[in-house]
Image (cartoon, rainbow, N blue to C red):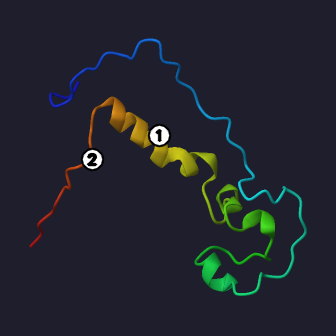
Amino acid sequence: MLPCVKRREAPQGKEVGLPSGHSDFGKTGRDQPNGPVPAGVDYEFWTGPAQMMPFNPCRFHKNWRWNYNTGGGQLMDWIGHHCDIAHWGLAISGTSHPSLDAS
């Protein structure tokens, strides 16, 4: 164990689990045909460096994360939250900012 990390007692009487989650945050369904880009959307800019694909509402706002062309699936969507949980358990406040001086 690292010398700077103090062991903490596990909370008693607390149930820990994962939310059920789902793969349709945008409520678009999973099987919609490709269609026209919504008015006002610069789809080329929105797609960025990813491979250009026909517009489909199932791959657009909120649901882009489930398409490996534009997102990383469940793991990449939740990893920041799980790191937060680890930091809470280690009592890391996140208030320090590392710095680097290079010459």
Q: Is residue 64 left or right of residue 58?
A: left
Q: Position of residue 60 (x, y in %)?
A: 72, 68
**Neighbourhood count class around disc 1 (C-alpha, 10 Å): few under 14, some 14–19, many 20 upward:** few
Name which of mark 2 and mark 1 comes first in the sequence: 1
The residue indicated by pointer 2 is 94
Q: Which mark is residue 82?
A: 1
Residue drawn where x is 87% and y is 77% of the image: 35
- Label 1: element kind: helix
- In the depicted structure, whether residue 50 falls above or below residue 98: below
Q: Which mark is residue 95?
A: none
- In the depicted structure, whether residue 1 falls above or below residue 44: above
Q: Position of residue 87 (x, y in %)?
A: 34, 37
Residue drawn where x is 84% and y is 82% of the image: 36
- In the depicted structure, whether residue 84 falls above or below residue 57: above
Q: Position of residue 68 (x, y in %)?
A: 67, 59
- Label 2: element kind: loop
Quadrant in which the N terminus appears: top left
Please state which amino acid type lies under the numbered disc 1.
His
Q: Nearer the viewer, residue 10 or 72?
A: 10
Q: Is residue 19 left or right of residue 59?
A: left
Q: Quadrant of residue 43?
A: bottom right
Q: Is residue 101 left or right of residue 73?
A: left
Q: Position of residue 7 (x, y in %)?
A: 25, 20
Residue extending farthest to the top is: 12
Q: Quadrant of residue 52?
A: bottom right
The residues tagged by marks 2 and 1 sit, at their Cα atoms, a distance apart of 14 Å
Please state which amino acid type lies under the numbered disc 2.
Gly
Residue drawn where x is 79% and y is 63% of the image: 58
Q: Quadrant of residue 67?
A: bottom right
- Foreground mark, 2 or 1, reads 2
